[in-house]
Amino acid sequence: MNNKSLLTIVIVLLLGIFAIVAYEEMDQQSPGEELAESIGEVGEEIGDEIDDATTD
């Protein structure tokens, strides 16, 4: 295997790793979105507990 093909393989692998890292960063939520989602979940849980307590 010559140096050019080895360099090509290394470059392709590095580009693949970079693409995976960039995709993972795009998928994460901002702190504001996380807070809003947490507040929504708390509201749902409170509603579920009220329903459970009032229905027999």
Image (cartoon, grey):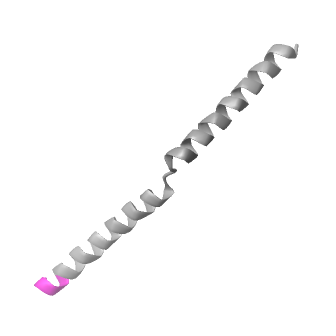
In the displayed structure image, the side of residue 15 where residue 36 appears, left or right: right
Residue bounds of the magenta highlight: 1-5
Q: Is residue 37 magenta?
A: no
Apparent side of residue 20 relative to residue 8 in the rendered image (left or right): right
Q: Is residue 56 visible?
A: yes
**Residue drawn where x is 52% and y is 50% of the image:** 29
Query: Left or right of 40: which side holds 1?
Result: left
Q: Is residue 42 rendered to the left or right of residue 7?
A: right
Q: Is residue 2 visible?
A: no
Which residue is nearer to you in this view: 7 or 40?
A: 40
Q: Which residue lies at the image location 44% right of the left edge and 63% below the top edge?
A: 23
Q: Quadrant of residue 43?
A: top right
Residue that appears at 43% across and 58% down: 25
Q: Quarter of the image holding residue 18?
A: bottom left
Q: Residue furthest front?
A: 32
Tell me where residue 36 appears, x and y as whole percent: 61, 41
Q: In the picture shown, does residue 14 fall above or below 51?
A: below
Residue 35: quadrant of the picture: top right
